[in-house]
Amino acid sequence: MSNVVLTRREGSVLTITLNRPDVYNALNRDVHEGLAAALDAASDPEVRAVVLTGAGRGFCSGQDLREFSDLSGGVRAALEETYHPNVRAIRALEKPVLAAVNGACAGAGLSLALACDVRIASSEASFVPGFIGIGLVPDAGSTWFLHRLLGFSRAFEWMVSNRRLSADEALIWGLVSEEVPAERFAQRVAELAEWYASLPTRAVAMTKQLFEHAYTASLDEQLELEAALQQAATETEDFSEGVQAFLEKRLPGFKGR
């Protein structure tokens, strides 16, 4: 595994850390390759929750502009070869993926955070669109995620204004689900990841699938998929354990199977 992307496994939680702290974890081809390998490792069934974070004071500052002028084949080809596979891999993981935004989160780094299922922010985190500030448009899926999270008007206004958003504002907007004081951030991320890993993983994955499908489905299509996945859920070991625990008035011990 590349040292610009680190992985750490604790129980059922895999933490992926972008590790270029001297440049606020800016993205280059080495980072993309390391992230792809880490996300592949995250597909292990024994991994039941994934945390994506950054080393040092930043989450991710976006594209490393020093590499930008050397992109062979142009930006379009580079996006297809690097960013797009990793964004798709995050969305395809059949388990919860948490973005632990520890500091500056900008440009395509914001896109990576948006691709995750849950975002939790340190009080020292900040969110900056970045793209319009250098005459570019949002990419790596950020427009797709943002207009669903914030609505068209707010998402558009924020992207073109290039305004820095504090962790407080991000929480109020619904961009993140929780803001945590910096001194307790690592502990809270670990607690939250462990809690997600304790859930019935296959049911969580199918819930993720349902919400993805709901964006474009008709009501009848959504009802049909809900019924099909509910049938699949009833055939899991975790369903049997959940029912038994309910009848016995105890907490369930889900195994992710």
Image (cartoon, rainbow, N blue to C red):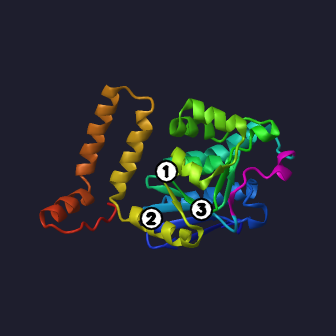
Say if mark 3 contacts mark 2, CB within 8 Å.
no
Magenta extent: 58-69
Q: Position of residue 253 (x, y in %)?
A: 27, 68
Relative side of 135 to 213, left or right: right
The residue pinned by badge 2 equals 192
- Would you identify the image quadrant in which residue 37 lies? bottom right
Q: CA distance from mark 3 to mark 2?
A: 16 Å
Eye-nearest disc, 3 or 1? 3
Instruction: Specify the label residue 12 is tagged with.
Output: none
Query: How dense is the environment of label 2, judged by Cα within 10 Å: few (below 14), some, or many (20 and up)?
Result: some
Mark sitting earlier along the chain (3/1): 1
Which image quarter: residue 153?
Answer: top right
| Mark 3 → mark 1, Cα distance in angstroms | 20 Å
For the image, the number of numbered tags is: 3
Q: Is residue 144 above or below residue 16?
A: above
Instruction: Name the residue located 62 percent from the left edge and 40 percent from the top edge.
Output: 142
Residue 169 appears in the picture as rendered: yes
Is residue 60 magenta-colored?
Answer: yes
SS for callout 3: loop
- Mark 2, secondary structure of its residue: helix
Which residue is labeled 3 in the image?
123
Question: Disc 3 or disc 2, which is closer to the eye?
Answer: 3
Q: Position of residue 90 (x, y in %)?
A: 54, 50
> Residue at image x 64%, y 43%?
84
Q: Residue 231: where, in percent of width, then height? A: 24, 44
Q: Nearer the viewer, residue 63 or 42?
A: 63
Tag 1 secondary structure = loop
Mark 1 packing: few (<14 Cα in 10 Å), some, or many (20+)?
some
What amino acid is labelled 2 in the image? Answer: Leu
The residue identified by callout 1 is 117
Per the model, the C-alpha gap separating discs 1 and 2 is 13 Å
